[in-house]
Amino acid sequence: MICSSKRHVLHAVLIAEVISATALPARFAIAAPPVEAVGTVHTADTPAPTEPKSVDVRGVVDDRAIARRLKAILDATPGWFPDATVEVKDGVAVLGGTALTEEHKAWAGRLARETQGVVAAINQIQVADSSLWDLSESRKELRGMWRELIRLTPRIVASLIVLAVTIALTLLGARIARALLRRRFDSELLVRVGARALAAPLFIFGLYVMLRVTGLTRLALTVLGGTGVFGLILGIGFRDIAENFLASILISTRRPFRAGDTIQVDTVTGIVQKVTTRGTIVMTFSGNHVLIPNAIIYKSIIHNFTTNPNVRIDFLIGIGYDDSIVHAQEVGMELLRAHEAVLADPPPMILVETLGPATVDLRVYYWIDATKHSFLRVQSSVMRAMKRAYQTAGISLPDAAREVLFPQGVPIRMLDREGAGAGTDAAVKPREPSAPIDSAEVVSMAEGGLESEAEAIQQQADQAQDLESGESIIPGEPKART
């Protein structure tokens, strides 16, 4: 029984020894990456090396075997180590030579450390200096970009198709919006702004779809979410410009004046030439172009002298206290009725305004047609004719009161009771009315006529350089509104 058991144990030991002897060569085999065929040409821009696996030395670990195996592996690489050297002593591997890149140098160090029997690895491999004219990295980047472009070509084509469809739909939508808005609004500026405002959401949506098709989802969300923020920033940063633009829309809608109207805004008086989105161009009666921002126009008081062609003119004239007020009024009214530029309807008036220190002040009112006659010329003509008529009628025009000193005294002569009433209006004898004035007295050579100077101003405006290009946002022609 005992002998039989011993035989079984010996058989088991022998079987184990056979199995161990059979498996031992495979255990100590050196694992190395596959080596390409001899004669293959390698360049520095080959793909990055893979992580090296552990290297085993067959049988007993020997320094020379380790060195030979590592040298064979380094030489088998695709030209990464042109002059590699390996020295192993007591398990310490020293790597030398040159490597093409830092990545290749690090790979050799990891390879030596993973080799069985290597206690420590000293990596003395130097990285070869690249030439100034080495374009290998540039070629590598260009090839990568080309491959990326080829990969994205279908998406780019699809995004371009989406962009073309978006632009077409946006233009079509803007055209339809303009047609609908023109039926409701007369302002061309308001029609253009409204059409663009209605077409803008369509374009933004198409841009979002295009970015999604391209694969730029985050950028699409950024564009979609940043549109409102960007508009708010623009509104705050360009507040004055936005205010001026809104005023242009309101002016084109309300139309407080037209091109060719004579207006006064603040201290500027002139003929409107054109209204743009920036401002209103006015040519003053001095021949100067003035650009007034539309925001100032809309917020200021506007005097439009062309809306009603009839303009009332008034001036003050003083007569003496010894002259009859009624007679002075009659002489003045007769002159105004005979003047060719003064309108009969509304009728002229001569009213007493003040009783001054030395004169009785009369205010003369009359109306003219400003589209035919000049305000300044008619006023000069009427005042000149009024002075002549009063002098002819014997009505005095004293100057302002002044202090007069008489060093020798003033002689006084007493009048009797019969002349006490002299000097009153009741005792003044009626005077003969002055003869009607002829045309030669109405217009002097210096006045040059009574016609309006708007035509002359417009001729100067036509000859002058345009202050700002662009179409006018209000209707009307300056020549037609003189």
Image (cartoon, rainbow, N blue to C red):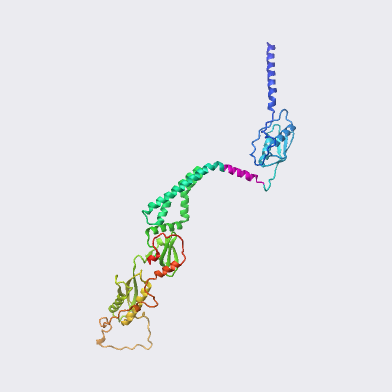
Residue 224 in view = no
Occupied quadrant, residue 118:
top right
Q: Nearer the viewer, residue 142 or 75?
A: 142
Residue 315 in view = yes
Magenta stretch encompasses residue 85: no
Q: Measuring from the top left, give residue 222's x and y in whole percent.
A: 49, 46
Q: Measuring from the top left, give residue 184's x and y in whole percent.
A: 36, 54
Q: Nearer the viewer, residue 401 or 84?
A: 84
Q: Please determine whether, in this image, residue 411 is positioned above or below residue 121.
A: below
Q: Measuring from the top left, give residue 10's x and y in whole percent.
A: 70, 16
Position of 50 compared to 254: left or right?
right
Q: Quadrant of the N terminus?
A: top right
Position of 251 compared to 105: left or right?
left
Residues rendered magenta in the picture = 134-148
Q: Measuring from the top left, give residue 179's x and y in whole percent.
A: 39, 52
Q: Main secondary structure of the magenta part?
A: helix
